Image (tube, rainbow, N blue to C red):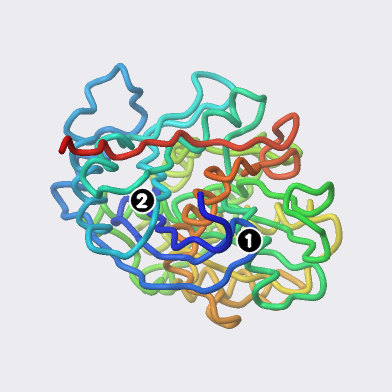
Amino acid sequence: MKSGPVRALGAMSGTSLDGVDAALVETDGVTITRFGATRYRPYREAEAAVLRGALGKWPQDDIAEAARIVLAAHVGALAGMEGELVGFHGQTLAHEPDGRGTHQAGDGDALAAALGLPVIWDFRSSDIEMGGQGAPLAPFFHWACAKWIGAEGPLAFLNLGGVGNLTWVDPAAAAPEAEGALLAFDTGPANAPINDLMMQRRGLAFDRDGALAATGRVVDGALELFLEEGYFRKMPPKSLDRNDFSVMLDLVRELGDADAVATMTAMGAAAVMQGMEHCPVPPARLLVTGGGRHNPVMMAMLRSALDCPVEPVEAVGLDGDMLEAQAFAYLAVRVMRGMPTSAPGTTGVRAPVGGGRISRPLKRAG
């Protein structure tokens, strides 16, 4: 690769199954130079239904249609964007870091051929092979964002996607892989179980603006049973599959729609509160990214329970809808330059490791 900053594209299709985010970041793999264009390609309902049906499946299962949808959506999101390489996360269908590994649907070779650009993909497998959880992977980028906004003391990023994950950052650290620079882990379920309940009961993709939760009451008994789950007693780093907390749906099965959604929203917030107790020192602020920051009920619950300011990342000039896509653009440059993408403090891997496979477009004859 040429030296200096690279115009990298990143793409993310999260566990909420809403669509593909695509974003350009100019970076040398350490420092963010600038943020560029962004795009969003939503999944049509028929596409999302196929992807939901493929959740929990592995490469040996019949996932051909899901893989086709993932590839087509990413080509649609990325085609024509002016980048020099692509970080392609793919669509997570199954994640068992202590068992069968991790599975993201998506073919980097096919995407490289379609776009005519090098594609870095399969970011998680190397980390798992080295004893890590393979997730979360955005923390190295969060460290770069903390530098970019000029943070002077420890702060935390909270991503409220299908699953919640927390990154505590010390921006004084010399590098993201340095000891004590980062602590990251999945807090617990966030939007995914709420979305599943909304689809089951009302045929809606999600609780827009927390409107239904705002009309319900939190049932303390169900919340207390949720917090007895053994995951909350595990020390980080730790990670989850989208469906690891399917018990949530059972805990609210007898509740009316509004009370069920209010209680599940409280469960997501309570999981974050439990997670904040693991921070090495209290963060000066909590910056929230992902779809959950648009839920005023969830945000109000967090603000009322935590001692630090809770703000959407837009408060510091970042784009909460695109942060994970931007993260994979940044990580792609690190992979191309042989730099680590995860460390013991972010995934529990034994030593800093760089993940990712590189697919290059075939040169045409003549």
Q: Which of 267 and 223 is in front in this view?
A: 267
Residue found at x 23% / y 58%:
79
Quadrant (top left/top right/bottom left/bottom right) for the C terminus: top left
Q: In this view, does 76 lie to the left or right of 326?
A: left
Q: Where is residue 176 in the image (x, y as percent from the top left)?
A: 72, 53
Q: In this view, does 61 lie to the left or right of 272?
A: left
Identity of the amino acid at label 1? His
Identity of the amino acid at label 2? Ser
Residue found at x 59% / y 52%:
165
Q: In this view, does 216 lie above or below 55?
A: below
Q: What element carries label 2?
A: strand
Q: In this view, does 237 lie above or below 172?
A: above
Answer whether labels 2 and 1 touch (C-beta < 8 Å): no
Query: Most extreme residue toward the top, as rendered?
Result: 60
Residue found at x 42% / y 39%:
121
Query: Most extreme residue toward the front, as rendered?
Result: 366
Residue found at x 82% / y 59%:
173
Q: In this view, does 60 lie to the left or right of 150?
A: left
* Residue 32 visible in the snapshot: yes
Mark 1 Cα-neighbour bin, 10 Å: few <14, some 14–19, many ≥20:
many
Q: Is mark 1 on a helix, strand or loop?
A: helix
Q: Nearer the viewer, residue 257 or 85?
A: 85
* Residue 255 visible in the snapshot: no
* Cα separation between marks 2 and 1: 18 Å
Numbered mark located on residue 142 in the image:
1
Q: Is residue 349 left or right of residue 116?
A: right
The picture quadrant where one finds residue 243 is: top left
- Of callouts 2 and 1, the N-terminal one: 2
Residue of label 2: 13
The picture quadrant where one finds residue 313 is: bottom right
Q: Nearer the viewer, residue 88 or 6?
A: 6
